[in-house]
Amino acid sequence: MNDISSMSSDDRDIEVLARDIVRIERQCFYGDEPERDRLRKIREKLNNEIVKKSKAS
Amino acid sequence: MIIESVTVENFRSFYGEQTVNFSTDPVKNTTIIYAMNGVGKTNLLNAILWCLHGEFSPGFKNSSDILNWEAKKRGRKSYHVTVNFTEDGKLYSIKRSAGDVDNFKVFRIVDGNAEEIKRNATVFVNSIIPKDMAGYFINDGEGSDLTVDARGMISVKRSIRDILGFQVAEKSLDDLAKIKKEYRDELKRFDVDNELAGLEEKLEVFETSIKENQKQLSDNQEAYEDYKIRLDQIDKDLDGANLVVIKKLQSDRIRAERDHKSANSDLKAHTNKKISLIREYSWVAFAHKLSDEALDFIDEAELEGKVPAPFNVQLVNDILKRSECICGACIKPGSEAYQNIKAMLGKAADPALLNRLQKARSRLTAIKTLAPQAKERLESNFTACVRAEKTITRLADEIREYSIKIEAVDDQRIEKLEKDRRLFKAKCSEANNTIIRKGIKIEDLVQQRKKHEENIGRLKGLSPRARLSREKISLVEKVEAAINRELAEAEGSIKETLEGKINHFLDKYLRQDYRVKMTSDFKIGLMDRDDRLVPPGGGQSAILSFIYISSLIAIARERRDMKSSILTPGAIAPLIFDAPFSNLDPSYAPNVARELPKLVDQLIILMYQDKAKNVDSVLESEGKLGREYYLTEEIAGPQGEKLIHELDIDGKRVPVTVYDAPMDKVLIKEAKRHV
């Protein structure tokens, strides 16, 4: 597993985002959330990241 | 996870409600369920798998027809399975029903009372034994993807990825690709002048092309390794030929081929050296004549005493400024003496110019010194190249000559081997050329893609919506790269671990000099002590599958507490094997029976009783056998000419087929409990 603490801020954000997206997928794959919702949730996650970045810049 | 019991009700061959209580003893951890073929072993295994995850093993036939036929005739409309198990010392119960009522419930049992786990019940079960790994623990053999190919090799890439917990991450990548496609379509709509959309479209083409070429590269690498293994086999067969003349020719040819390969490497190294020497000395070669002439010119000027002059500009200017000579005489401006001294300025040496001239001279001298050195080194390199080329030609002739001599031997087997050898040599060379070509192509495509990405980054005047779409695409690409990186690292690091584990189990199971051969594309095969691939059949393939599954289980166990948000952690669960000994040679079966229970906390074996394989007696003598069950088939029809099958249970012959029964059904009966 990649060590987040040793990463640059941008890389860390991407790593966290990747893990969050896989978590969404996992919840749907293992039945915690309806599978049909997963694309919507991943899109939301990506959009939030874009908004966060645009605010920061 | 330790399974306490399973209760099946109207599930396939099992009419009514029947229960198996498995051995939960940590030492006597094995339960055997004996059954004749086609009676219900696979049904029982699938009942457990279905109860846990609502799925069946890939080889389970007619999976839409589960309700027991007799139950259906009697108006029953649903079937049920209950699995009771402990996890970390706590007792749980999973109940699944289907038919007219579909139901899935998980309970925590506290002091005999069942408390339903309502939230995240499926997730809870998956956290104990993930559904993408369950098929390896609850293994019906036939249904797994461990197919042995014609040469005795098993492709294990998918199973490795499953046990490493890749499935969810791979699904994420699929979904990210879908979302990226949506963003690209969005971009095409928003990018009014189509400039960015056009570049994005090209980028997509590059990505597709890179993927296709990578796939072709990997296919060719796989094929190359495969041909190499075949070639090695043929060479070993030729080497082991009975004819002394063949043995000698083959060993000479192998030596010549080895030297040929080494000479080729030498030539490659010399050629690379040549390139670096040319880079280092090309300027010397070009400047050599010019530097000679320039040095002659400078030296000629020096000899004439013009450069440098015996006085410099500063001295003449000082005399003129002070209107006084260095001897103290007065020099009036405008006088003849003044004019004479002023005229000296034209010949006076300039220190700055002198300095530059000296530097130029030093560089020119360096060229003059380097020239012979360059000549010597280049000549020596050219000689080495020519020598290597000659060696290569000589060895190629030698190899050809040996091959002709081998072919000339009147022996059909040798003829066939030689023919195959030529074929696989050609295939190897073809695959290798493709690998090189594809490598260059991919590098080129990656560069082109990079250029396009830079062009995209430089685009000005985009609409805000088009820019946003581009940012989203870029973000998705970064996330994809992060996930792919982690998957590649995990897969890269597992090869050595897996090889180690398989070899460890080979030592224990076979006690022979077998070693595992693993290709870069995760194909495994057994190599004998002469380094020959063991052909399929003879039980070795069965044992390799066995050992491989054992290794997977061991890896899953080690990865249970793994901290990763990208990969799914492993699991500790019972190993439930359907007919594991059926294809196993009787000489291997006792060793497997001895070692298998040591691998897992709980072992459940569904098997046909074959006394010749000594499975139960070994398990018992090793103190590993906890409980024994058997399945009896009751048939609502006359015996006629048919035999009554019997099992040997505790020294007694027990019939397991009963005719003229009131209905068709299979009964689960306990044979013995080893307290």
Image (cartoon, grey):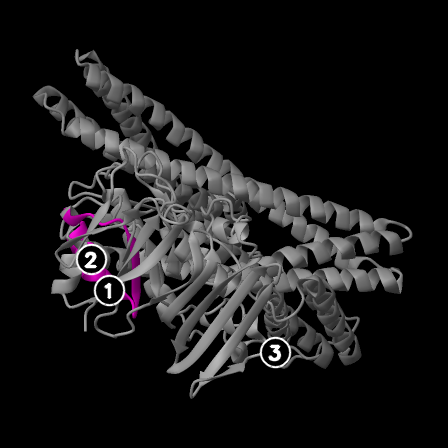
Query: Can you tell which quarter of the image residue B182 is in?
Result: bottom right
From the image, tell me which residue sits under label 3. B326
From the image, tell me which residue sits under label 1. B597
- Whether pointer 1 and pointer 2 mark residues with C-beta atoms closer than 8 Å, the reply is yes
Marks 2 and 3: same chain? yes
Q: Chain of mark 1?
A: B
Looking at numbered disc 3 in the image, what kind of residue is underneath it?
Ile
In space, the residues marked 1 and 3 are separated at their CA atoms by 111 Å
Q: Position of residue B146 (x, y in %)?
A: 38, 46
Looking at numbered disc 1 in the image, what kind of residue is underneath it?
Pro
Q: Is residue B446 above or below residue A53?
A: above
- Counting every numbered tag in the picture gives 3
Q: Position of residue B196 (x, y in %)?
A: 82, 52
Q: Position of residue B387 (x, y in %)?
A: 29, 31
Looking at numbered disc 2 in the image, what kind of residue is underneath it?
Ala
Say if the magenta span includes residue B606.
yes
Circle 1 Cα neighbour tier, 10 Å, few/some/many (<14 / 14–19 / ≥20):
many
Q: Which residues are magenta?
A: B587-611
From the image, tell me which residue sits under label 2. B593
Q: Is residue B290 above or below residue B606?
A: above
Q: Chain of mark 2?
A: B
